[in-house]
Image (spheres, grey):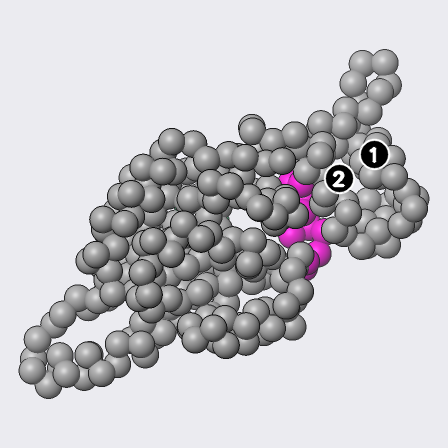
Amino acid sequence: MINWFPGHMNKTLKQMQGDSKLCDCFIYVLDARCPTSCINPEFLKVVKGKPIIYVLNKADLVNTTDINNFKAYFNNLGSECVSLNATVSGNSKIIISTINKIFKDRLTANAQKNVNFITRAMVLGVPNSGKSTIVNNLCNKARAVTGNKAGVTRNKQWVRVTENIEIMDTPGVLLPNFDDEEKAYNLAIVGSVKDEVLNLVEVAYKLIDRLNKHVLSSKYNVDIDNNTPYNAVLEKIGKKRGCIIKGGEIDLERAAKTLLTDFRSGKIGKICFEKI
Ligand SMILES: Nc1nc2c(ncn2[C@@H]2O[C@H](COP(=O)(O)OP(=O)(O)O)[C@@H](O)[C@H]2O)c(=O)[nH]1
Ligand SMILES: [Mg+2]
């Protein structure tokens, strides 16, 4: 079972609870490949009933049908929900228009009184969901440090993104306890749990379990089907990709990394692990 909740995440949560008093709303960033796995009950203590904009980020790695189903799901919960490929410059503007929509009345009142109240939004989510990329996209410059692995953002930072909106990036926080092992593996597969604390071969088996074997077979040009054991699938992929150790044995660890890297970068196709 995956269990990774380092002390700094607890510290981050406490800090976020303090900072959230200043916040008017929250930009809750989810990896579109496993949106409900990214929901962290700990964030309830931070959000405390204020408006949430759910962002299905990395939407470029998922089919439109899945995205639309999840939008409907979050809308039914009474929240705004947008989808995004945050790596494309200017895309995150939809978040600004959504914040303006939520606070329309206040903005109108402000304009009439000629005052300019700042609306503050905290960006939160599990590690590696794309929070800092969104912050950078909104600022049009590289302010927040990003990276395709868990635990890159450490320090909190407030940034003004329009005349009346400020946002704060936060470090990713995972669930202190996973009661759903499959959701934990979803997070491990998409890179939200630090690879260093994982058994990557085990994670790769979980990924193989979730992938269409026909697609996998054609992507790697290997002979596999639904009955091929996971270790045999990984061995075949490893062999094809030259993951060999001395003596001709397959390096399963390297094969696992190769498969995970290919999946994470979208090379295996547009895949969502959850159906809603
Ligand atoms: N394909 C894709 N990659 C993204 C997207 N947003 C962020 N990324 C990548 O995901 C990785 C993690 O992003 P980062 O912003 O550091 O995540 P954070 O830990 O939530 O702050 C980086 O390699 C980003 O380039 C997206 O919409 N699509
Ligand atoms: Mg970050």
Q: Position of residue 48 (x, y in %)?
A: 31, 60
Closest to the observer, 24 or 169: 24
Q: Quick one: label 1, few (<14), some, or many (20+) residues within 10 Å?
A: some
Judge left or right: residue 197 versus residue 257. left
What residue sits right under mark 1 in the picture? 231
Percent across and percent down for residue 81 are 46, 70
Identify the residue at horizontal 50%, vertical 77% (top origin): 76
> How many callouts does the rendering have?
2
The picture quadrant where one finds residue 159 is bottom left
Q: Decide: few, some or many residues near mark 2? Use Cα within 10 Å; few <14, some 14-19, many ≥20.
A: some
Residue at image x 43%, y 75%? 78
Q: Earlier in the sequence, mark 2 or mark 1?
A: 2
User: Relative to the observer, which residue lies in front, 63 or 10?
Assistant: 10
Q: Measured along the vertical axis of the image, is residue 51 above or below residue 179? A: below
Q: Amino acid at mark 1?
A: Asn
**Which type of secondary structure does the marked residue at label 2 adopt?**
helix
Residue 205's disc number:
2
Question: Farthest front residue?
Answer: 179
Q: Magenta stretch?
A: 260-271
Instruction: Describe residue 269's horizontal placement relative to residue 155 as left or right.
Output: right
Q: Are marks 2 and 1 in contact (CB under 8 Å)?
A: yes
Identity, as a three-letter code, of the amino acid under mark 2: Tyr
Observer able to see residue 41: yes
- Residue 39 lies, in percent from the top left, at 49, 55
